[in-house]
Amino acid sequence: MRFVFCCLLAVALLIAQSVLRHLFLPEWLVPQGLLICAIFLAFYEFSLAGAVAAFLLGLLLDLSSGVLLGPWAAAYVVIYGVFTFLSQRLFVESSAVSMMVVAIATLLSGVVFLSLAFEYQAVTLAELAMLAGQALSSAMLTPLVFKILRFAWRRPDRALNKRGAVVSAV
């Protein structure tokens, strides 16, 4: 059920991203919501199912972009793999850490995508500037998306009180 919720949120973020592009906003201002979902999966779901979900998120972006089938999917799997290993050493509950990780992941996934999609072209300074703007806008959206996804990933065997989660005895 968690992955269905993640996919529904990803579709909603993809629609919002497309609407923002049609409102004639500059490309650097449009956040990458699907990448935020992939980073969340790297933080909270380190399993084969999480890797498949990250691949499906990238494939969904590939299908909607109309460029090639596969570069975004590969980039998201690379990002998932890198940050799954690093998430064991990061304080993933911090909003500042998650925003910084999403900003770095946006730059890294963009470079992986550009190198796979346009393999014989060098990454230009204009493309890096666009990725930097997307990294900043994606980082600003991260706390909201993480809060929504944490709702689906909370454990049902824990009852919440004002101090945090305690294990239910019932």
Image (cartoon, rainbow, N blue to C red):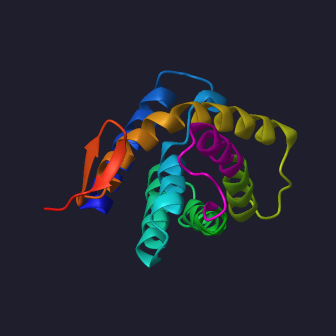
Image position of 30 (left or right of 122): left
Q: Give, as a single range, the part of the protein colored magenta.
A: 87-106
Residue displayed at 75% across by 54% down: 111
Image position of 125 (left or right of 92): right
- The front one of 167 and 131 is 167
Q: Is residue 64 above or below residue 144?
A: below
Q: Is residue 161 visible?
A: yes
- Residue 118 coordinates in the image, percent (x, y): 74, 59
Quarter of the view holding residue 132: top right
- The front one of 34 and 20 is 34
Q: Quadrant of the C terminus?
A: bottom left
Main SS of residues in magenta: helix
Residue 145 among those drawn in magenta: no
Q: Quadrant of the N terminus?
A: bottom left
Image position of 49 (left or right of 156): right
- Residue 76 coordinates in the image, percent (x, y): 57, 61
- Residue 105 coordinates in the image, percent (x, y): 67, 51
Residue 102 among those drawn in magenta: yes
